[in-house]
Image: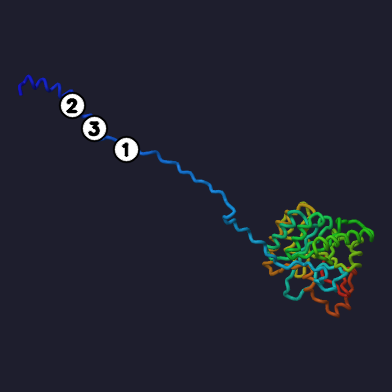
Amino acid sequence: MHPSRLSRLVPLVLLLAPAVWLLLFAARYQPGPVRPEAQIVTQRVVPRTSSQPKPTPLAPKVLLYPPLTDPQASPFPKAFYGTVVRQVKLAPGEKLIALTFDDGPWPVTTEQVLDILHQHGARATFFWIGKNLEHFPRIAQKVLENGHAVGDHTWSHRYGPVSAAAAAKEIDSTERVIAQDSEAATRLFRPPGGNLKNGLVHYALAHGYTVVMWSVSSADTDPKAPWTAFAENVLKGARPGTIVLMHDGGGNRSRTVQALPVILEGLQRQGYRFVTVPELLAAALPIPLEAKSASKPASPHLQVKGQTRTGTH
């Protein structure tokens, strides 16, 4: 090629070279097609319809014992009618004990006590105040439905001396409410404060009631004692045939509720079974004939047709 022509082509090539390089780069690195943005998937909530199955309800609590609802029933020997009992003597190796609860029925606490007794397969006896029974009949009915026994604890929990007419009103009024509202009858009576001499017990004995005292007290009315003291009192004092005093009503009984499982578990480990007062009386041993003739009870209230019931206050 002629030198003059070549000299003219070189500048032209230098000018076109960047454009050619850009075209080659663009062809090699051309981006692919743009992807559509991801769609946001939402879940549609389907409302429940009547055709859909509903959750299975909890099974009702199975009653451990049949309710005591026969007003004519005689659940314990008539030898105990018209007597005062603190505890009974049982056959050797028979480890029965009766827990009793006073001053109910009571909101919350009574039902908590019932649940704990149910969990441990235990029966008990509840001594009701008439005015509380009138206010809380549903709670009272639950006591009976769970197979527990009940007793009369007067209408208004009077401690002081009462006339014969006042004693009749206190005891009979409560008995009528028990029979009407709870469809049960009781021949058990416990005097408020354990007072044997204010006129109430005299009336109860004259009308055939069994006056149920106690041989071990949990002392759960002590306002300063911790619940552990209540449990210790019962665990240390328990013997076969013991009647234990506790409270489910009449005030804040949350400490009693705390102590109760410890009492039940501790005594069950020792082989005790928990029965109602009528069941305990039915299991009592009769006093031998020679002991009957020799016995001279210090108080006529501790005599059972010539027999002396063993026990301490």
Residue 85 or 116: which is nearer the viewer?
A: 116
Identify whether 243 is placed above or below 49. below
The residue shown at (23%, 29%) is 22
Residue located beneath label 2 in the image = 17
- First-in-chain label (2 vs 1): 2
Identify whether 114 is placed above or below 28. below
Marks 3/2 in contact by CB < 8 Å: the verdict is no
Marks 2/1 in contact by CB < 8 Å: the verdict is no
Q: Quadrant of the C terminus?
A: bottom right
Give the amino acid at mark 2: Ala
Residue located beneath label 3 in the image = 25
The residue shown at (86%, 70%) is 81
Q: Quadrant of the N terminus?
A: top left
Residue located beneath label 1 in the image = 33
> For residue 89, which quarter of the picture?
bottom right
Give the amino acid at mark 3: Phe
Mark 3 or mark 1, which is nearer to you? 1
> For residue 267, which quarter of the picture?
bottom right
Along the horizontal axis of the image, is 244 left or right of 18?
A: right
Along the horizontal axis of the image, is 263 left or right of 214?
A: left
Residue 111 point in image, percent of width and height: 73, 57
Residue 265 point in image, percent of width and height: 68, 63
**How far, Cα to Cα, is label 2 from label 1?**
29 Å
- First-in-chain label (3 vs 1): 3
